[in-house]
Image (cartoon, rainbow, N blue to C red):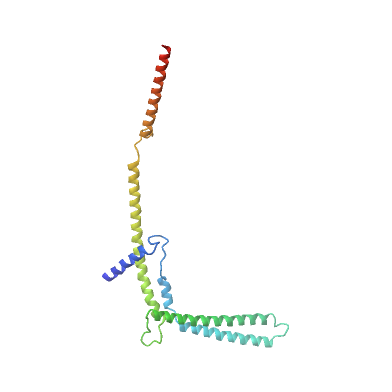
Amino acid sequence: CSFYRIIAEVFYHILSHIICDAGKEQCIFPLSEPQDLFQASQMKFDDFQKDLRKLKKDLRACETQAGKVYQVSLEEHIQPFKDSMEQFINQAKIDQENEEKSLTEAHKSFLETAAYFCVKPKMGEKEVSPHAFFSIWHEFSSDFKDLWKKENKLILQEKVKEAEEVCRQKKGKSLYNIKPRHDSGIVRTDCIIIIIILLLLTFSFSLFFLHFVCTLS
C-alpha cells in the first residue's frame, strides 16, 4: 500500500505539473486504452501468416479456375470477363505481397520493441509473444487509468476550490470599495459636489444682489 501511495504521489505530481490540461474535461488519457492493449495481447503472428498463406492458395486456385474458363469460352464471349479477371488477379497478387511485407516488418518491429524493454521469451518459447508483451502493458495501463481518473478528479476539485476562493476574494474587495448610496441612488460624493455648486450659485447670487443694491443706493 505504501509503495502504491508513492506511485500515486509521483503520478499526481506528473499530472498536475506536466500535463497542461489536467483537471479539465478535454484532458486526454495519454496512454493506449487498456481495451486496445488487451486486444493486441490476443494477436498471434502465426495466425496472420496462416491466413496470408490461405489467401495466396485461394488466389492461385482462382487464377487456375479463370484459366479453365478462358479455354472453354468462345472468342466472342471471352471479353470483358478475361480482362476484368486478369486485372483483378494481378492487383490481388500485389496486395498479397504488400500484406506479407507489412506483416514481416511488423513482426520484426515487435521483436525489436520487446528487446528494447528487456522482455524475454518464456520457458519453451522461441520468441516473445504478443500475449506476453502486451499483457504487461495492459495491466499497467489499467492501473494507470484508475489513478488517472482519481487524481484528475482531485485536481479538478482543487481548481474549483481555488476558483471559488478567487471569486470570494474579488467579491469581498468589490463590496469594500462600493460607496454607500442614498435611497435616491446618488453616491455621497455626487451630493457633495451638487451642494458645493449650489453654494457657489448662492454666493454668486448674493454678490450680484449686493452689487445691485449698492447701485440703487
User: Going by the picture, which residue comes out furthest to the top?
Assistant: 217
Q: Give the residue at x 26% y 70%.
A: 2
In the rendered image, the quadrant that contains the N terminus is bottom left
Q: Which of these two is toward me, 71 or 130?
A: 130
Q: Quadrant of residue 143?
A: bottom left
Q: Which of these two is toward me, 33 or 212?
A: 212
Spot occupied by residue 138 in the image (x, y as percentages of width and height):
38, 74
User: Measured along the vertical axis of the image, is residue 212 above or below residue 134?
Assistant: above
Spot occupied by residue 112 in the image (x, y as percentages of width and height):
43, 81
Q: Quadrant of residue 158?
A: bottom left
Q: Which of these two is toward me, 130 or 216?
A: 216
Instruction: Tell how many labels.
Output: 0
User: Going by the picture, which residue comes out furthest to the left?
Assistant: 2
Q: Give the residue at x 64% y 85%.
A: 66
In the rendered image, the quadrant that contains the C terminus is top left
Spot occupied by residue 68 in the image (x, y as percentages of width and height):
65, 88
Answer left or right for 87 relative to 38.
Answer: right
Spot occupied by residue 129 in the image (x, y as percentages of width and height):
41, 82
Answer left or right for 61 relative to 18.
Answer: right
Q: Give the residue at x 66% y 86%.
A: 69
Res. 156 visible in picture: yes
Answer left or right for 98 relative to 82.
Answer: left
Res. 1 visible in picture: no
